[in-house]
Amino acid sequence: MSADGIDINRRRFLTTTASVAGGAGAVATSLPFIATMTPSAKTRAIGAPVEVEIGDLQPGQLRIAQWQGKPVWILRRSDSSLGTIAEQDDVVADPESEREQQPDYAKNEYRSIKPEYLIVLGLCTHLGCSPTYVSRDQASNHNLGSEWKGGFFCPCHGSRFDLAGRVYSGVPAPTNLVVPPHMYLSDTRVLIGDDSGVAS
């Protein structure tokens, strides 16, 4: 105790206790605030890669998956439809896929890792509408003419894409459909959104 009657030890004890309690309160108060700054599980899942089963996909069939909130089309192309892709070079705007709408491993005639499968975002590159897959046999139902070899048609503004997702010349869409990063986990499963296992 000091000369003026103040208990210094008690004062130190109370000051230390108040400081510890205040610090604990500050931490407890800030934890919920910090938690709101970290992305939720749902938000993290939106950007996460997505596995898709393709083993039961028949030639000519289209499967739609979701990745980052966008539709991803997986089209299994038949041998005969693959043969029509080169025939379309004179009617598409970017026949060699020179614009950066696909990873390097899909910068080829078929715009794919495996020619049999086309994997593209199902969004028109004009205004983001979702085109319709129209086979060669369905051309008359959409007034696409007898020269239609199959592909994707956007009824909103008339854009057309061939079976490799290449945009036709003279339509509103400026570029080919986007090929997302992807890789094959097996002959029957593909991973959309991750291509770390693709040989460069």
Image (spheres, rainbow, N blue to C red):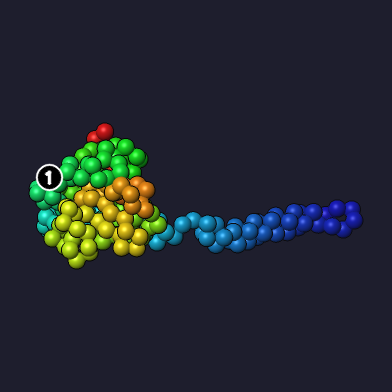
Q: Is residue 45 above or below residue 196?
A: below
Q: Kindly indicate the quadrant of the structure image that contains residue 156.
A: bottom left
Q: Residue at x 34, y 40 (%)?
A: 99
Q: Please give the name of the residue rendered at 63% of the width and 61% of the height, measured from the top-left corner.
A: 25
Q: Answer with left or right where residue 62 lies relative to residue 6.
A: left
In the image, taking residue 68 as reference, residue 144 lies left or right, namely left
**How many numbered circles are shown?**
1
Judge from the rendering whether residue 173 lies leftward or rightward of residue 81; answer left or right.
Answer: right
Where residue 36 sits: x, y (%)?
52, 60
- Kind of residue at badge 1: Gly
**Residue topped by disc 1:** 83
| Residue 24 spot, x, y in % from top left | 61, 58
Residue 14, by quadrant, is: bottom right
Q: Which residue is the extreme one toward the top?
A: 200
x and y, in percent, of residue 66 in the image = 30, 59
Residue 182 location (% of width, % of height):
27, 46
Of 156 and 16, nearer the camera is 156
Give above or below for 57 relative to 89. below
In front of the other: 163 or 143: 143
Residue visible at 25% across and 56% down in the picture = 152
User: Which quadrant, please, contains the N terminus?
Assistant: bottom right
- Furthest toward the bottom, the residue is 141
Q: Is residue 183 visible?
A: no
What SS does tag 1 mark? helix
Quarter of the figure that contains the C terminus: top left
In the foreground, 45 or 28: 45
Pick the front one: 143 or 5: 143
Work out whether residue 97 can be spotted: yes
